[in-house]
């Protein structure tokens, strides 16, 4: 049965914002009415429709406030949208502060109870949440949610251990649209970046320190000494400037291409032969999954939720974090053996399609919404 769902996320290029936006788009395509509630249009929401809406959270600028009270402004907007659009539920991505705002909106609605679902994505738990000053409110907002999901078994374990959560936390993994993210055909963009004899390595992230962007350059430097290759750097963030400096220092300027933030990342990922993701931590590894769906094997750190996505030696390699030499060696193993690269790419594509495609994961969210709505009806809300 179609539902009216309010979705709140950070409208940025980070994984949580991408997943939340893609979830909304997929739900709208399945007949649900989706209302995004945030301070800016989510990055992958390209247009509105009769089933896809955006509501901007406007913040008050007042001399008394050093910082605009976003949590309160968001709660008010959630309340107004719920009333005006007769929402069935709210789905908030990232615990802080979104689940707190949802709790306040639900309280303001009083007897017309509005359930809310919280999806945990990673740093809301592993970094922000475990700051002692935020731990009590994070735990409270999780416990008060009508349902809680985590994007990996790893993140569920961390949440339960760090916060002493006593309520159920469902694992619903990240997903990929396998009709959009797929191997390139003859009309792909590969020739824009490399000559026929050159290999292509790709990295996609928000260029924050946890992503180890400088390690990507170091790994590629070692690869480039052995084989002709190009490196596509997709994304932007605080470590872009240091990475550009390191490229100049190593005289790799002709072989490393910084592409900045991109919306159509599938057209770039499927150009590549290998994806590098040497992060210190990944609660899931959405960039790796998107590459896999494009038939691109990944060389990643063995951290967080990545072992739940990548099968070491089958559709990619998992290496100890910060082990630059081994990551370079594994990358060269793939690039130097076309048959192995093809086999691993096919295995990666099959893994993504069979386990993480939207056709498999989106129904899990719909089933969760139905359970939450049923509990609301049973309670007389």
Image (cartoon, rainbow, N blue to C red):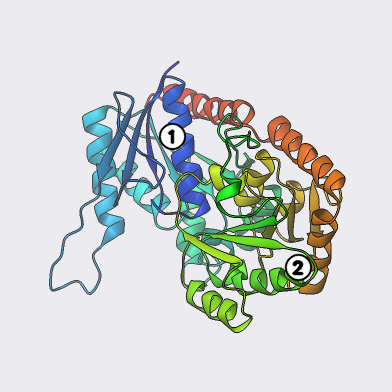
Residue 54 spot, x, y in % from top left:
28, 38
Give the quadrant of residue 214.
Answer: bottom right
Mark 2 neighbour density, 10 Å: few (under 14) some (14–19) many (20 or more)? many
Q: Is residue 305 above or below residue 278?
A: above
Q: Give the residue number, with chain letter if any, for mark 1.
A: 24
**Residue beneath disc 2:** 223
Q: Which residue appears at 23% of the width and 32% of the height?
A: 83
Q: Position of residue 51 (x, y in %)?
A: 33, 25
Question: Residue at point 67% right, 73% down?
Answer: 215
Q: Tell me if I can see residue 124 in this picture.
A: yes
Q: Is residue 38 above or below residue 258?
A: above
Q: Decide: few, some or many residues near mark 1? Use Cα within 10 Å; few <14, some 14-19, many ≥20.
A: many
Q: Which quadrant would residue 12 be assigned to in this image?
A: bottom left
Residue 171 image-quadrant placement: top right
The furthest residue to the front: 196
- Residue, far bottom: 249
- Split into 4 quadrants, where in the image is the C terminus? top left
Q: Is residue 347 above or below residue 75?
A: above
Q: Dot 1 lies on which element?
A: helix
């Amino acid at each position: 049965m179609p539902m009216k769902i309010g979705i709140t996320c950070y409208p940025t290029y980070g994984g949580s914002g991408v997943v939340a936006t893609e979830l909304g788009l997929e739900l709208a395509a399945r007949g649900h009415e989706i209302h995004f509630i945030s301070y800016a249009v989510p990055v992958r929401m390209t247009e509105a429709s009769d089933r896809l809406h955006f509501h901007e959270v406007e913040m008050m600028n007042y001399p008394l406030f050093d910082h605009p009270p976003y949590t309160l402004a968001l709660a008010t907007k959630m309340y107004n949208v719920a009333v005006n659009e007769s929402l069935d539920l709210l789905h908030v991505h990232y615990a802080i502060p979104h689940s707190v705002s949802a709790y306040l909106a639900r309280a303001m609605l009083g007897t017309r109870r509005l359930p809310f679902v919280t999806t945990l994505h990673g740093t809301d738990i592993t970094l922000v949440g475990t700051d002692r000053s935020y731990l009590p409110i994070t735990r409270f907002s999780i416990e008060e949610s009508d349902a809680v999901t985590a994007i990996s078994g790893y993140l569920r374990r961390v949440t339960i251990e760090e916060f002493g959560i006593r309520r159920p936390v469902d694992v619903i993994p990240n997903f990929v649209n396998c009709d959009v993210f797929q191997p390139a055909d003859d009309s792909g963009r590969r020739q824009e970046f490399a000559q026929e004899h050159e290999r292509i390595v790709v990295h996609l992230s928000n260029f924050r320190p946890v992503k180890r962007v400088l390690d990507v350059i170091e790994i590629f430097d070692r690869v480039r000494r052995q084989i002709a290759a190009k490196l596509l750097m997709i994304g932007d963030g605080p470590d872009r400037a240091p990475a550009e400096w390191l490229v100049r220092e190593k005289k790799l300027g002709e072989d490393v291409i910084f592409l900045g933030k991109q919306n159509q990342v599938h057209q770039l990922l499927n150009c590549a032969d290998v994806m590098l993701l040497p992060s210190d931590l990944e609660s899931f590894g959405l960039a790796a999954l998107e590459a896999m769906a494009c038939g691109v094997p990944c060389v990643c750190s063995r951290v967080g939720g990545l072992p739940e996505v990548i099968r070491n030696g089958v559709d990619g390699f998992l290496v100890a974090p910060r082990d630059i030499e081994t990551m370079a060696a594994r990358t060269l193993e793939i690039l130097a053996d076309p048959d192995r690269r093809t086999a691993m790419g096919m295995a990666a594509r099959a893994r993504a399609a069979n386990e993480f495609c939207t056709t498999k994961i989106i129904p899990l969210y719909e089933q969760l919404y139905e359970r939450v709505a049923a509990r609301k009806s049973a309670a007389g809300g």
